Amino acid sequence: MEKGPRPGRKTKINKMDALIGLAAFVAAALVGWAVAELKMKACNYHRNEEEVESEKRSAAQITRELSIKDVISSISTKGFKAN
């Protein structure tokens, strides 16, 4: 009747078990990569007119970088009571 390893003793790890684990990990990574590649090729994304227009508007609104004085003058520290 074997009870397993005694406390304080290290169990031996078979080198073949480690290689099998590494091979399984690499195989899983390759399968995941292949699924991601197939999904990228199958699902094409095209921007519609609304997205293009909103991108142009947001680019037009960004005219200059705000200084710290501009930011402080435009923010409110009163929260919801800011009127």
Image (tube, grey):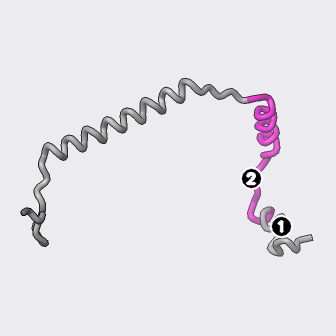
The residue under label 1 is 73
The residue under label 2 is 65
Q: Amino acid at mark 2?
A: Glu
Query: Is residue 44 shown left or right of residue 65?
Result: left
Looking at marks 1 and 2 on the same chain, the residue that comes earlier in the sequence is marked by 2
**Which label number is shown at residue 11?**
none
Q: Amino acid at mark 1?
A: Ser
Residue 30 in which image quadrant: top left
Q: Is residue 69 magenta?
A: yes
Query: Is residue 48 shown left or right of residue 8?
Result: right
Between residue 24 and residue 67, name the one nearer to us: 24
In the rendered structure, which segment of residues is drawn in magenta? Answer: 48-70
Determine whether 77 is above or below 12 in the image: below
**The N terminus - image quarter:** bottom left
Q: Residue at x 65, y 28 (%)?
A: 45
**The C terminus - image quarter:** bottom right
Q: Is residue 32 magenta?
A: no
Q: Dot 1 surroundings within 10 Å: few (below 14), some, or many (20 or more)?
A: few
